[in-house]
Amino acid sequence: MDIAEQVFGRLSGRWTLSRVIHPDKGTASGSATFTPAGPGRLHYREDVEVRLPGGYVGEAYREYEYVLEQGLIRVLLADGTTMHLLAFESEQEEQGDVWTAADIHDCRADQYRGTYRLAPGDRLTVDMKVDGPAKDYRIVTDYGRA
């Protein structure tokens, strides 16, 4: 079994999530579920409570598809556009294998540089650096098994 298959197999199920948008642009917390959606496919849905500076609090959701390809995981936006194509690598740490992958998504004039890290104990982190003419922020989302 290759690394992508191992990572893909560990994603299925329910997770809690905590998100911080830097610098001081807001937070979100809630849950995410990776649900099997056919062979080599997981449907991702998150439901969160968003808190923004100034006191705004509201509900939000996001959906993606994760598709297992030969040695890769493709993350698709709701419209079918590829967000990231992930080639995971393994690193040995004291607690066990840690799998990481990174990719860049160009969206018009903006770039979304995503780093995905799956650590022992089902700890997943997605670190997204967003740059563009009018954008400069970082979104860090930490997941734990629910």
Image (cartoon, grey):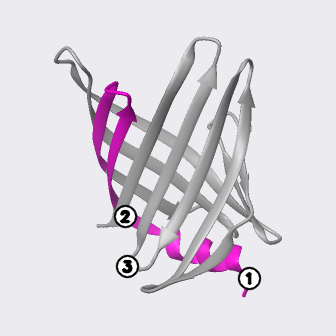
Q: CA distance from mark 2 to mark 3?
A: 14 Å
Is residue 14 shown left or right of residue 92?
left
Q: Residue 87's x, y, as percent?
A: 74, 64
Q: Within 10 angstroms of label 2, few (less than 14), some, or many (20 or more) residues? A: some
| Observer-nearest of 13 and 93 | 93
Q: Where does the magenta region start and end?
A: 1-30
Report the residue marked by disc 3.
Answer: 121
Question: What residue type is disc 2 on?
Answer: Arg
Question: What residue type is disc 3 on?
Answer: Gly
The residue under the point 61% across, 66% down is 100
Q: Residue 42's x, y, as percent?
A: 59, 61
Secondary structure beneath dot 3 equals loop
Q: Is residue 143 visible?
A: yes
Report the residue marked by disc 2.
Answer: 14
Report the residue marked by disc 1.
Answer: 2
Mark nearest the camera among 2 and 3 is 3
Q: CA distance from mark 1 to mark 3?
A: 20 Å
Q: Residue 138's x, y, as percent?
A: 48, 35
